[in-house]
Amino acid sequence: VLKQKQYPVRYSCYSPPLYSVFSRFHVNLQHGSDVVALQVNPRYQMLWVGPAYVVHNTRQNGTWGWEERKYETPFPRGQMFSLQILVTKESYKILANGKPFSEYKHRFPFSNVDRICVVGMVELSFVTFHYFTVPYKTIIHGGVQPGKGIIIQGVISPQAKRVLFSLRHRTGIAFDYSLCFDENVAVCNSYKDGKWGNEEQSGLKLFERGHAFQVIICCSPDNYEVFVNGKQTHTYSHRYNKLEEIDVLEVSGDVQLGFVHL
């Protein structure tokens, strides 16, 4: 039974390979046993006849509502998957295998959801439940090292002006990744010796106000590589080379966080 009543929150289901000859399973966010606030229901045609698709729906007062269908599935038979559900004030943002998949507007108050139900031919590895506040700050134990990847998932606020992701050390900012929505630009920079360096800019085409996102910051011996929703958007050469001293991640601005992995 879930106790958290605020937003944004993140429900996550992780599974080993799906059974290869099944037709459907579903993940429900429920109020009690009778009300289904959200059902995520991948459906597969028997013997691979016809397209696979995913249904979203709500059941209340003993009746299912109208189905919202998406004629694709990120959950192939026989393969592992992850499913994340980010709860915002307006809707559920659904990510599959770390990438934005769909959005479902609330038909039932999300604050009344008190349980998760998973049914069908699927085995669960684990289910987690997270709540993050913004500004968000966390320690990177051991500092940033070559080969380390930082994963951040969330939802950009509908009226967002700015979102910042910063890798900090004791005296400055080694890498600042700033999304400036009014200017439609992403800015990379460093703060060293009390001043900002030269900006490196790129576009914001993979970020949208009100939409879910995934950012991965990968560290190599020479640079940081930034990936947004699975696509590389920027390479930023190190301006502070004592990587082991870069030990703080900060996220701030107009964003709702759903997941952070260091």
Image (spheres, grey):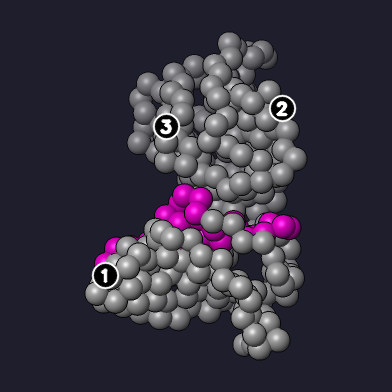
Residue 150 visible, this angle: no
Which amino acid, mark 1? Trp
Q: From the viewer's side, name the closer residue of 184 and 63.
A: 63
In space, the residues marked 3 and 1 are separated at their CA atoms by 34 Å
Q: Is residue 211 above or below residue 188?
A: below
Q: Magenta stretch mostly in which secondary structure?
A: strand
**Label 2 SS:** loop
Residue 65 sits above or below residue 188 on the image: below
Residue to which mark 1 is pinned: 48
List x then y, in percent, for residue 8.
68, 57
- Residue found farthest to the top: 198
Which residue, given by chain and number where applicable, does mark 3 sit on? 232
Q: Nearer the viewer, mark 3 or mark 2?
A: 2
* Number of residues whose C-alpha sits closer than 10 Å to that of mark 1, classed few (under 14), some (14–19) or many (20 or more): few
| Percent of width and height locating residue 135 | 70, 42
> How many marks do you count on the picture?
3
User: Is disc 3 in contact with disc 2, using a CB cutoff of under 8 Å?
Assistant: no
Check disc 3 and report its element: helix, strand or loop.
strand
Does dot 1 land on a helix, a strand or a loop? helix
Q: Quick one: label 3, few (<14), some, or many (20+) residues within 10 Å?
A: few
> Given the image, on which type of amino acid does mark 3 rest?
Gln
Point out the stretch of residues depicted in magenta.
78-101
Quadrant of residue 57 within the rendered picture: bottom right
Residue corresponding to mark 2: 182
**Residue located 40% across and 61% down the image:** 73
Q: Is 86 a magenta residue?
A: yes
User: Whole-percent x and y of residue 72?
Assistant: 41, 59
Does residue 200 belong to the magenta stretch? no
Q: Tell which tag, 3 or 1, sits nearer the viewer.
A: 1
Q: Is residue 164 above or below residue 39?
A: above
